């Protein structure tokens, strides 16, 4: 089909909305509440356009029709956009010093464009409470513009903790009384106004750095996303620059969690083989996603026995670091806000000691680097520290949905180039079948927590679940904006690294072999460092 926007003709397809066609062709239309992951909410109403014969409509919801004529910049449209912006700022309080998104806030950009003096709205801060969800998420309702993206995403995740309710004659977003948050953080990445943010650990880490014994470890997904915080293209691989930046911040050593992902793979592979041989507690579910574990404990406790006992990679590496280093403070850089919750779990302590002391999200690290005036883009590359630096390709792909499954099946089958492309990509439920010994093993990958709802899990032997769409590369602690195109680019970078690695099977790593021979010497120590039991839901 063809439509005209501002008297210029453009091609489009049936089912598209006017906003998408305009943006694809470089025509600027403000759209604060629009997110590609969600159905149009029609709430901010900044994307108003005039459609010939129909009048004013929101371009985020108006579907194209052949021959349609649209105008985007009339004086009346500009006037109405300014009015709508002022209404939004009557809710969203300007607090640049604290705003999680202050350096690229859409609302602040639009305020400057439409000459709106936002300070006149600051006195409305009173009466808007701030909520904290466990050790992971903060919701400042004074910044909420009632776009309802967070509510829609929470429902899409199959949780429904957030809701839009009437209070004092107005509708507003509130945490539910009958539901519990699972700390996936998707409310953060889908909020256009910075009302949601992670519970920050930056100040504690900055104090710890003064002591000189801080050891950083970063998750597989960080290397392909941290560059976005500094204007680099989506999916840029910045492993060496990341190490340099952490050393400039004062790190004693920097390790790669991909290394311990290889250990997770080996231990999980052993457990899968054991369960298959005994035909017990099948299917086995992965447990390295703490949001998924919490979801099971809160909403599907009958599945607790199906969770693998293997700890998540950064918890395992934290334990190894505490064993081998002299009184270290371990800080994990994670794409995930649920990891802040995970490190508080009592059952993950080793002889009463937390394996990981603090968790920083990708965004928190980005702010810390900027605060210290480190020019990330211009940094030279540095090598990771040993003995926990070098990882296999199997460890790196943990950052993408399907990566844990593919890594484990490479090891249990012993095939480096096993064809498991069916578990890659952003489809909600992915399936595969593989022969292990004489048995055909059916596996599934759940991409996004909402896709677990109606799954007939009994027909599978092994299931990977990642709460966040795209897996860790789409985590609640990752840079914004985020959509499927960005997720694809981040994941593609990890698979490129994997393809170039000389060693692509976890159990073939000489560094992992050394860790077992020097630290994980017997079953008792392996169980203490690498395994746990779930079902304790006392930590809220």
Image: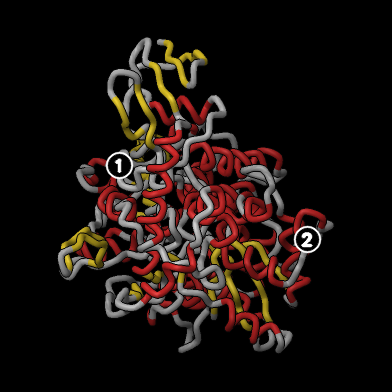
Q: Nearer the viewer, residue 101 or 476?
A: 101
User: Which residue is disc 1 drawn over?
Assistant: 42
Q: How many marks?
A: 2
Instruction: Please give the name of the residue rendered at 25% of the width and 67% of the height, measured from the top-left corner.
Output: 175
Q: Where is residue 139 in the image (x, y as percent from the top left)?
A: 37, 69
Front residue of 62/353: it is 62
In the depicted structure, whether residue 84 falls above or below residue 292: above
Q: Which residue is drawn at 69% across and 82% down?
A: 209
Report whether residue 445 is seen: no
Q: Where is residue 162 in the image (x, y as percent from the top left)?
A: 26, 61
In the drawing, what numbered circle is on residue 242?
none
Residue at image position (20%, 66%) is: 176
Q: Residue furthest right?
A: 380
- Sequence-earlier tag: 1 or 2: 1
Q: Do the residues labelled 1 and 2 touch (CB within 8 Å)?
A: no
Q: Which mark is residue 375?
A: 2
- Could you tell me which secondary element the residue under label 1 belongs to? loop
């Amino acid at each position: 089909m063809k439509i005209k926007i501002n008297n210029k003709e453009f091609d489009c397809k049936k089912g598209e909305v006017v906003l998408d066609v305009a943006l694809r062709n470089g025509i600027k239309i403000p759209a604060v509440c629009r997110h590609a992951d969600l159905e149009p909410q029609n709430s901010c109403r900044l994307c108003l356009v005039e459609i010939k014969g129909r009048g004013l409509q929101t371009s985020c919801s108006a579907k194209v029709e052949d021959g349609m004529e649209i105008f985007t910049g009339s004086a009346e449209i500009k006037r109405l956009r300014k009015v709508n912006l002022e209404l939004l700022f009557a809710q969203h309080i300007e607090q640049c010093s604290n705003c999680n998104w202050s350096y690229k806030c859409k609302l602040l950009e639009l305020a400057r464009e439409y000459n709106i003096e936002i300070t006149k709205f600051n006195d409305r801060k009173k009466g808007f409470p701030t909520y904290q969800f466990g050790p992971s998420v903060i919701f400042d309702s004074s910044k909420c513009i009632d776009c309802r993206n967070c509510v829609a995403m929470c429902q899409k995740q199959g949780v429904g903790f957030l809701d839009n309710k009437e209070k004092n004659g107005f509708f507003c977003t509130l945490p539910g009384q009958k539901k519990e948050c699972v700390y996936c953080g998707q409310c953060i990445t889908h909020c256009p106004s910075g009302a949601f943010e992670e519970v920050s650990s930056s100040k504690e880490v900055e104090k710890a750095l003064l002591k000189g014994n801080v050891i950083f470890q970063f998750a597989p997904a960080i290397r392909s996303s941290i560059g976005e915080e500094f204007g680099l293209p989506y999916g840029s691989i910045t492993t060496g620059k990341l190490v340099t930046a952490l050393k400039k911040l004062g790190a004693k050593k920097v390790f790669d969690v991909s290394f311990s992902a290889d250990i997770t793979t080996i231990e999980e592979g052993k457990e899968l083989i054991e369960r298959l041989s005994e035909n017990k507690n099948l299917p086995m579910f992965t447990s390295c996603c703490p949001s998924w574990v919490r979801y099971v404990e809160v909403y599907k406790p009958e599945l607790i026995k199906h969770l693998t006992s293997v700890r998540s990679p950064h918890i395992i590496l934290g334990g190894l670091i505490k064993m081998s280093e002299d009184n270290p403070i371990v800080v994990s850089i994670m794409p995930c806000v649920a990891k802040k919750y995970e490190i508080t779990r009592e059952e993950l302590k080793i002889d009463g000691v937390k394996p990981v002391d603090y968790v920083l999200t990708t965004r928190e690290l980005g702010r810390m680097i900027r605060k210290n005036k480190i020019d990330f883009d211009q940094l030279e590359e540095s090598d990771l520290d040993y003995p926990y630096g070098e990882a296999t390709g199997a460890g790196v792909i943990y950052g993408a949905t399907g990566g844990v499954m593919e890594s484990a099946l490479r090891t249990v089958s012993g095939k480096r180039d096993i064809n498991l492309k069916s578990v890659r990509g952003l489809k909600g439920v992915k399936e595969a079948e593989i022969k292990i010994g004489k048995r055909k093993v059916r596996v599934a990958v759940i991409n996004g927590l909402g896709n677990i709802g109606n799954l007939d899990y009994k027909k599978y032997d092994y299931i990977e679940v990642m709460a966040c769409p795209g897996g860790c590369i789409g985590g609640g602690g990752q840079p914004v904006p985020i959509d499927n195109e960005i997720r694809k680019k981040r994941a593609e970078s990890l698979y490129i690294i994997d393809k170039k690695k000389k060693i692509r099977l976890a159990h073939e790593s000489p560094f992992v072999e050394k860790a077992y021979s020097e630290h994980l010497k017997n079953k008792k120590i392996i169980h203490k460092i690498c395994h746990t039991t779930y079902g304790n839901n006392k930590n809220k």
